[in-house]
Image (cartoon, rainbow, N blue to C red):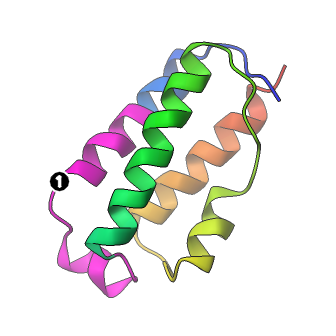
Amino acid sequence: MTFATDAQLLEQIAVMVQLLREPLSDESARHGWTRAIAEKWLHIFERLHADVSNLAVTAQASLSRVLDHDGVTGGHLLEKAASISTALRRCQK
């Protein structure tokens, strides 16, 4: 699936990348985030940012559902991932 360039979507992904580079908050840890999960998802969001920037073919999935499989149960990072999923669907070409 390819996506139309959307500055707001790219900004949302960039913010998520920055948040995942920072130390995890206590709130994030309570919701299942670990440093290993954050590193995994940092790479996923970096790749997603590059793909969307380049209008590349990108697999579409519910990011929050996949995070649930990684043990993430809530919190602001999960909410941001869900918002990115919604924006990805909106920007589908």
Main SS, magenta region, reads helix
In the picture, residue 29 is in which quadrant?
bottom left
In the picture, residue 70 is in which quadrant?
bottom right
Q: Is residue 71 left or right of residue 85?
A: left
Asked which secondary structure carries label 1, the reply is loop
Q: Is residue 83 left or right of residue 17?
A: right
Which residue in the rendered view is the most extreme toward the bottom?
30
Seen in the picture, residue 86 relative to 34 is either above or below; the reply is above
Can you give x and y, in whole percent of width and height, for residue 84 in the image?
Answer: 58, 43
Q: Is residue 78 magenta?
A: no
Q: Residue at x 33, y 58 (%)?
A: 39
Number of labelled discs?
1
Q: Is residue 19 magenta?
A: yes
Magenta stretch in the rendered image: 13-33
Q: Residue at x 47, y 52 (%)?
A: 80
Q: Residue at x 73, y 22 (%)?
A: 3
Can you give x and y, in whole percent of width and height, for residue 72 in the image?
Answer: 48, 78
**The C terminus lies in quadrant:** top right
Can you give x and y, in whole percent of width and height, for residue 67 in the image?
Answer: 56, 69
Three-letter residue code for mark 1: Glu
- Residue matched to label 1: 22
Seen in the picture, residue 24 relative to 61 is either above or below; the reply is below
